[in-house]
Image (tube, rainbow, N blue to C red):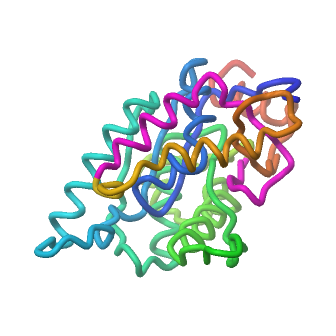
Amino acid sequence: METSFYIPESAMAIVAHPDDIEFTCVGTLARWAKAGSRISYVLCTSGDVGIATPGMTRKMAAEIREKEAGEAARVAGASEIIFLGEPDGLLQPTLDLRKKLVREIRRFRPEVVVTGDPTIVFANETYINHPDHRAASAAALDAVFPASGQPNLFQELEEEGLKAHKVRKVYISGPQQNELFVSIDETMDIKLAALRLHKSQFSDWDPGERVLEWASERAADKGMRYAETFRVITLEDDEHWEKMRQAQNGTG
């Protein structure tokens, strides 16, 4: 049973592809947005190899998928969506990608970062976790800690006015995570609507039934109909976080 629902002031989801957020954590992000949280989407790639239609180019595919992702983000209440333009299918957790993510974290200054688990290879008996998913999650975690909060890393960003920022919590999303069960009863319709906007991925099938089944299975015996699951890493405790907020706002 969900005994309390933590609502951050701001949250940033970092993933590899368009539709990754919708499959994994958009129900939770939409609940936060409805409660007043600022929500940022950061997509490492534009999914430019994700449409296999004859005659489709990577440039055309990127344009289609960016448009779909933008529409889905608006449905969920996200305030922005950022595309980093890394190569789809070839994503690597490089220092360059880490720096790009640190730039976005320092600019948006999220209280929470949501990403996947880079250690998951065999997701289940029928699916190997996409290497781009693992790469995006690894780069995101390395950007969160220690890079985004360490002013002596990527000092050129400090010189641009992007001051170091420490993230309060990291939410690791995925069906393998079983520490936190978030009810998405009130946002399941948003999750389905946002996912279905990725029309290029579902030309011959509707993902709704499968996603409903997954969310129902995760909610079983938890006093809710539908759930998303997470592991939560708390990097800054309540007392330290409040002191940082006061210092940033000049009220300490």
Residue at the (79%, 30%) spot, across then down? 243
Kindly indicate the quadrant of the structure image that contains residue 77. top left
The residue lying at 72 percent from left, 38 percent from top is 227
Which quarter of the rendering shows the C terminus? Answer: top right
Closer to the camera, 133 or 99?
A: 133
Q: Is residue 98 left or right of residue 235?
A: left
Range of residues picked out in magenta: 170-199
Q: Nearer the viewer, residue 225 or 18?
A: 225
> For the view shown, which residue lies furthest in the left direction?
55
How many numbered discs? 0
Residue that appears at 43% across and 63% down: 44
Asked if the stretch drawn in magenta spans residue 110, the answer is no
Where residue 119 appears, x then y in whole percent? 72, 74
List x then y, in percent, for residue 100: 44, 62
In the figure, is residue 60 to the left or right of 44? left
Check if residue 182 falls in the magenta segment. Answer: yes
Residue in the picture at 42% in, 34% down: 193
